[in-house]
Image (spheres, grey):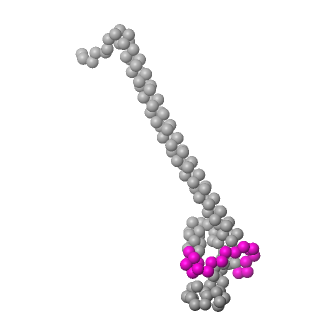
Amino acid sequence: EGLGASSSTCEVVIQDPRLVDEFERLNQQLRRHGFREVPHYLQPLLEADHAVGPASARASLVADACDLWGVCGEVLDAYDRRGRRLRDALLGERAEERHSRDARVNALLQANSKLEAELKPFRCMGATPSTSA
């Protein structure tokens, strides 16, 4: 799927068929989430490498290690940015809630001050306001 004679000086070779399938699923996930694939190709194993085994085990997957490393970095950077956006949104929401609570407390304090001012003349006279007519 793209490397042929790779110019990379470092390659990852996967011979276990289950891991080859996992690598293919990884590339599908990368594509699905908007990342680039890790370049790789299948390389036939020598007869001595697979004396008796299933046909799927007769090839190894060779991936460019530098590209693999680069894609991992891109994914981690994307998750870091996403984490920052989520944190900023959460902090913004908390600040908004705090501002709303502060406004409510200030309104209650003003109402309390107004009631205290209304009660002050009665307290000075030593009497309390009559609630009966």
**Left or right: 49 with respect to 95?**
right
**Left or right: 73 with respect to 114?**
right
Residue 1 visible to an observer of this rendering: no
| Residue 46 picture location, percent across and down | 66, 88
Q: Was residue 77 drawn as part of the magenta stretch in this picture?
A: no
**Quadrant of the snapshot with the N terminus:** bottom right
Q: Image point 63% across, 59% down: which residue? A: 77
**Quadrant of the snapshot with the C terminus:** top left
| Residue 107 picture location, percent across and down | 44, 29
| Residue 68 picture location, percent across and down | 66, 69
Marker count (numbered): 0
**Quarter of the image holding residue 61?**
bottom right
Residue 25 to residue 73: above or below: below
| Residue 7 picture location, percent across and down | 75, 76
Q: Was residue 7 drawn as part of the magenta stretch in this picture?
A: yes
Q: Image point 32% across, 11% down: which residue? A: 127
Q: Image point 58% across, 90% down: which residue? A: 52
**Most foreground residue, 18 or 100:** 18
**Quarter of the image holding residue 30?**
bottom right
Magenta span of residues: 4-22
Residue 14 to residue 85: above or below: below
Task: Residue lying at the far top in this picture: please name it.
Answer: 125
